[in-house]
Image: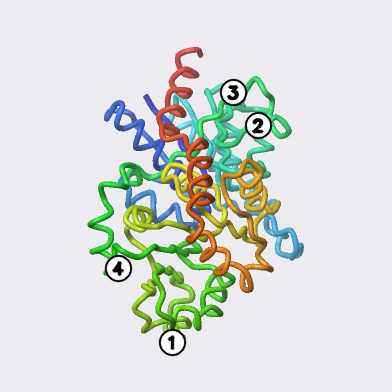
Amino acid sequence: MKVIISGGGTGGHVYPALAVAQELKKRDTSIDILFVGAKGKMEMEKVPKAGFPIEGLSIVGLHRTRIWRNVKFPLKLISSLWKARKIIKNFKPDAAMGFGGFASGPVIYLAASKGIPSMIQEQNSYAGITNKILAKRVHKICVAYPNMKQFFQAEKIVQTGNPVRKDIGDLESKKEAAYRHFGLDPQKKTLFIFGGSLGARTLNDAVEASSTYWKTDTDIQMIWQVGKLYHDEFSKGAMVKNENVKQLAFVDRMDLAYAIADVIACRAGALTISELSIAGKAAILVPSPNVAEDHQTMNAKALADVGAAILLKDVDAKEKMINEAISLLSEDDKRQSLQNEIKKLAKPKAAEMIVDEMIKLIRNK
């Protein structure tokens, strides 16, 4: 069997794609998988590191504000369509799957046009523009959220959830190792704050603004991932030498951070929410206002509406985020309720379900 997997640009597209590729290989090591991404984007580094070959297209996204920067878009689109056609002709895939991001557009469009069994996976509660365009041509659409009929044909939709890293299962057994790893106190409650690998200015400013609280004798401790982008700036701040605060540029063992976190404050990316659901953690979600179609707010609202998370606007975070987190750490019943509700949304077998759908498509051809 030969499968083309396309998509990328962000971790929210790349990591689910890799999880599905790994599940395919788990089923049958002889399956031949080829990734197609966008030149210069993170997939061109992450995919080879995971052991899969990848081809790069020159495709770029449309700029919504700086319109003048779209002048080269038509040429890059034509070039990418030509290369995608060549890739499909040479590789001869039995199936093709897109995970969003503009790289998946030319590949999945052409594959579906040629009658190759084709699927897309939408990670967010608000569909991205590439997937909305492709939806009319593909045979199956795997989604993470309910009520996606406003974007896609109902008969094509399968709610699978988002594939996530396997190591966030069975967190209870990792607690002892986690406290040792971070050098934290098992007798204290733990707040975990992160804004992605690069970091989030708003979340970091909110923590820095609370420095006077952390100087007091408190029974709360914090893991604070400031992000690679902000590490130098915030490593000079008031929080660095505080024994209750573990400040890190990047958390390389997210499973251990999840294991001991009693409350988490973070952005509302689709992959993050899927991980929170499987980990079963009480969360304060601060959606980034700088994403397409404001989809993080839609993601967070989908959880807040069913009592599975607390939604806090980005503009309110500096003033309210830490106080909200400290309050939640002291309210055991509220925290437990959030944990119970978010667990109901978990889809731990998302990768397996997506692969099952792909195999069905191939067999039905």
Q: How many labels does the image show?
A: 4
Q: Which residue is drawn at 39% across and 74% down?
A: 245
Q: Mark 1 points at which residue?
A: 236
Residue 293, placed above or below residue 234: above
Q: Which of marks 3 and 1 is nearer the N terminus?
A: 3
Cα gap from disc 2 to disc 3, whole angstroms: 8 Å
Q: Could you say where residue 352 lies in the image, as x and y percent from the top left?
A: 40, 29
Q: Residue 135 carries which label?
A: 2
Q: Which of marks 2 and 1 is nearer the N terminus?
A: 2
Q: Which of marks 2 and 4 is nearer the N terminus?
A: 2
Q: Could you say where residue 118 lies in the image, as x and y percent from the top left?
A: 54, 27
Q: What residue type is labelled 1?
A: Lys
Q: Residue 184 carries which label?
A: 4
Residue 25, placed above or below residue 117: below
Cα gap from disc 4 to disc 3, whole angstroms: 50 Å
Q: Which amino acid does label 3 sit on?
A: His
Quarter of the figure with residue 34: top left
Q: Which amino acid does label 2 sit on?
A: Ala
Q: Residue at x 66, y 41 (%)?
A: 127
Quadrant where the N terminus lies? top left
Say if mark 4 contacts mark 1, CB within 8 Å: no
Seen from the viewer's position, the closer of residues 269 and 340 is 340
List the single residue furthest toward the top.
Answer: 364
Residue 167, placed above or below residue 321: above
